Image (cartoon, grey):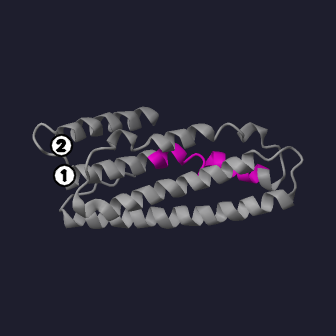
Amino acid sequence: MKNLVTLVFLALCATLVSACDPTTGNKNMSPDDYLTHNISIWNGVVSQTEPWIGGERGEKMLADASELKSMKGYKNSLDNPRKELGNYGKGYEGFGIPEDAQDLDVKLKAFQKSVDTVLATMQEIAALPDGYTEAQLAPLLERLQAASDTYDTDGEALDAAQKVYAKKHNIQLVVNG
């Protein structure tokens, strides 16, 4: 899956470089290029974090935590997804986005932030020392639930905004799965 994300990323970079060519005066992405960029980042974030957010690794970790088992095996495992999350979109800084895509861009950044908050809270749970108690775990689980609710809300808002933007610009979205 990581190779597929890398290939999509490289293809998108090539498209954006040609679409935002300072030698031609074109400094903003077209609506189609921006929507491709936006969806690519969203898909990359989701594919990178899916094992933890709603996936088997996250479910196993939370099941172990609820049984007050050692979190040592999870302590460093969440570092990579958070690092990768921080890198999504960095290659596009400096490319202008269409004027009417500002709200969509804000929603993408809010989604990325909510994903990071979920992962950060999971890291705090994973950092609990052996012998932790339910009293230590409970506030973290409450924060995780709130962060997960925000993640769901932000993801739904981003999905809806992408569809509206696509419709506005007559861009056909391809849904896989």
The x, y position of residue 27, in whole percent, is 18, 46
Residue range highlighted in magenta: 45-64
As drawn, the label of residue 30 is: 1
Residue 164 is left or right of residue 53, and the answer is: left
The residue that appears at 84% across and 51% down in the rendered structure is 68
Query: Which residue occupies the foreground of this view, 25 or 139?
Result: 25
The x, y position of residue 137, in whole percent, is 80, 57
Q: Residue furthest left?
A: 24
Question: Does the residue at mark 2 contact the one at mark 1 (Cβ under 8 Å)?
Answer: yes
Classify the position of the N terminus by image quarter: top left
Total numbered badges shown on the rendered structure: 2
- Give the quarter of the image for residue 77: top right
In three-dimensional space, the C-alpha distance between marks 2 and 1, rounded to whole angstroms, equals: 7 Å
Dot placed on the residue nearer the N-terminal end, 2 or 1: 2
Q: Is residue 54 visible?
A: no
Identity of the amino acid at label 2?
A: Ala
Residue that numbered label 2 is attached to: 19
The x, y position of residue 88, in whole percent, is 43, 43
Callout 2 environment at 10 Å: few (<14), some (14 to 19), or many (20+)? Answer: some
The x, y position of residue 139, in whole percent, is 76, 63
Callout 1 environment at 10 Å: few (<14), some (14 to 19), or many (20+)? Answer: some
The residue that appears at 22% across and 37% down in the rendered structure is 17
- Give the quarter of the image for residue 82: top right
